[in-house]
Image (cartoon, rainbow, N blue to C red):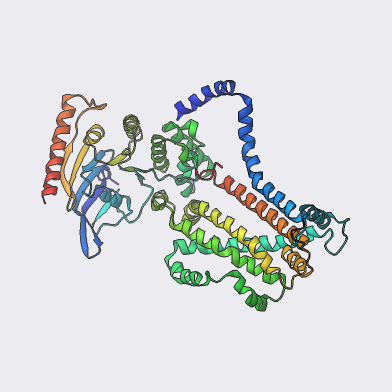
Amino acid sequence: MSVQSAEIAAGAPMASVMKPRGPSAWLHVRPLVLAFVVPLALLAFWHFATVSRWTRLIPTPAETAETMWDFAFGGIIDDAFSATAHIHLLASMNRVYGGFALAALAGIGFGLLIGRVAIARQMFDPFFQLLRPIPVTAWLPLSMIFFGLGARSAFFLVFLGAFYPILINTIFGVRSVDPKLFEAAQMLGCKGSALFRQVVLPASLPSIFTGLRLGLGLAWFVIVVGEMTGVPQGLGAVIMDGRTLSRSDIVICGMIIIGIAGYLSDLAVQLIGRKLLAWSPQHSKG
Amino acid sequence: MASHLLQDLVQVRGVSKSFEIGTETIHALKDVNLTIREGEFVCLIGASGCGKSTLLRIIAGFEMATTGDVLVSGHPVKEPGPDRGMVFQDYALFPWLTVRQNIAFGPKQRGLDKAEIVEKTETFVDMVGLRRFADAYPHQLSGGMKQRVSIARVLANDARVLLMDEPFGALDAMTRERLQDELLQIWQRAKLTVVFVTHSIEEAVLLSDRVVVMTAGPGCIESQDQVMLPRPRDLTSPEFNDIRRIVGGKLHSNVSRAKAA
C-alpha cells in the first residue's frame, strides 16, 4: 500500500507533463455532452412534428416553454394557472416527502425487525407479502373512504407506494449481513439491542439506501394518482385539470416539473447515501 | 486466587460436539481434553475436518459443547466475551468503521470514558504500525493490514487469550512471515496466551510452545509435542527440521489412517 501510494505520488507530475491538455478536458466534458444527445434529439423530433402540424393536440416546444414561463412567473397568458407552479409543486412535495418519511420510518423499522427477529418475521412477513402485490392504485377507492377525498388520501397512497421497496430492501440487507460480524461484535462485548444500532443498521445501510431510492421514485410516481381526485392543489391535480380543459401544454408542464423534482430528489438521496456509505467500495465512487 | 490456579488459563474438559445433518449425526469432536497455561503459545494442527476450528469456536463461546465444558480462568464459558479475542481468517472487520474506530469498538462497548478509549486506541494503532492508515476504511487496506487491525481490535479490549483461526492463511508468503514475527513480539510483550489454528506444520513449529495434533473422524487430540527451541527460531536449522519431521510424521500417519477408514 505504502509502495503503491509512493508510486502514484512520484508518477503524478510526470503524467501531467506528458499528457496534452486537450483530450483530458474533452474526457471530462464528454459524458455531459453524451447525456444531452438523446433529449435534444427528442426535442428536435417534437419540434418538427408539431411545427408541421402533424397533430394539433400537442403544442410545440416553444409554446410549451411559453406556458411553462407563465405557469411559473405569470404575465403571458394570465389565467387560473399563471404563476401557480410553486404552489402546486410545494403541495406535492409536502405529500411526497411526508409520505416518504413515514414510509422510511415504518419500512426500516419493520425491516430491521423482520430481518433479525424470528417471531417478527413469522408474524409480519406473510402479511406484508400478501398485501404487496396489490397495486397502490387499487387502494384509491378504499383510501378515499378511509381518509376522505383529498390530500390525506394522496398522502396515504404515497406512503403505501414507498413502503414496500424500503421494507423489502431493508429485510434483504439485514438478512445478508455477514454472520461473522455478529460474532465479532459479541466477542467484543456488544449484545442485545446495541447489536441493532451498532451492527445490523450500519451493515444493512447500503441495501436500505437502495430501498429509499426506489421508494422515493415510487412516491413521485404515485403522487399523480393520489392527486387526481378531489385535490385542488398539486402537480397531479394540475395534470388532471389540464386534461379536462384540453390544455396539453399544461399537462406537459406538469410532467416536466415532476420529472425534474423527482430527479433532484433522487440526486439528493444519492448524495446523502454517498456521504454515509463512504466506507463501501460500491458506493464511495461514482 | 492462588497463583498455581491461575497458571491453567484454559481448561477443555471432556468436550464432545456432534451435529445433526439430516438423519445423520456427525461427530466433530470426541472427548477432547486440553489444558493451556497462562502465557503459552499453542498451535492446533490437523487435516481439514478434524474439528480444530470447532474446538476454537467452542472456547470462544460461539458454539456450545454437546458434552463436557471449557473453563477460562476457572469460569465456565457460556457465551462470547472480551477475555477471549477471536481473530478470524477473513478478518471480520466492521467495514463501516475506520481502522481507529474498529480498534475502539471493544473499549466503547465496555463504556470506558473517552480519554481512556482514545489512549487505548492510539496505543494499539501504534503497536500494529498503522498510524498512517488510522483513518482508512477496511476496503482500502491490504490483507496483512486488515489482520493487524483485527489483532489490535481484540488486544485493545484486554483479551487475555488470543484465539486465532488460520489468521495468516489468506496472506502471501512475505506478509505472512512478517506478521508471524510481529505476532511473536506482541505475544511476548503483552504476555498473552495464544491458541492458534493452522494447517501448516512449519508455521506451528515456528510459532508455538506446544503443537497439538488433531485427527479427524471423530475429531480428537492425537498427540502433543513441546517445542523447546529458543526464539527467534531458524527455519533452516537441523533441530527445527527434526521437530518438523516428527510433527509431520504424526500428522500424515493419521491422515492416511483417516483416508483408509
Please determine whether, in this image, residue A147 is positioned above or below residue A263: below
Could you tell me residue B147's position as x and y percent? 38, 38
Q: Quadrant of the N terminus of chain A?
A: top left
Residue at the spot x=64%, y=74% of the render? A140
In the image, B20 versus B79, the foreground residue is: B20
The image position of residue B3, as x and y in percent, is 27, 42
Q: Say whether residue B128 is left or right of residue A46.
A: left
- In the drawing, does residue B121 fall left or right of residue B64? right
Specify the quadrant of the image occupied by residue B42: top left
> Who is closer to the viewer here, A242 or B76?
A242
- Residue B222: image quadrant is top left
From this viewpoint, is residue B86 visible? yes
Q: Which of A3/B71 is in front?
A: A3
x, y percent for residue B184: 31, 32
Which of the 4 image quadrants contains residue B158? top left
Image quarter where the C terminus of chain A lies is: top right
The residue lying at 60 percent from left, 34 percent from top is A27
Q: Which residue is at a point 77% across and 68% down the rendered structure image?
A: A241
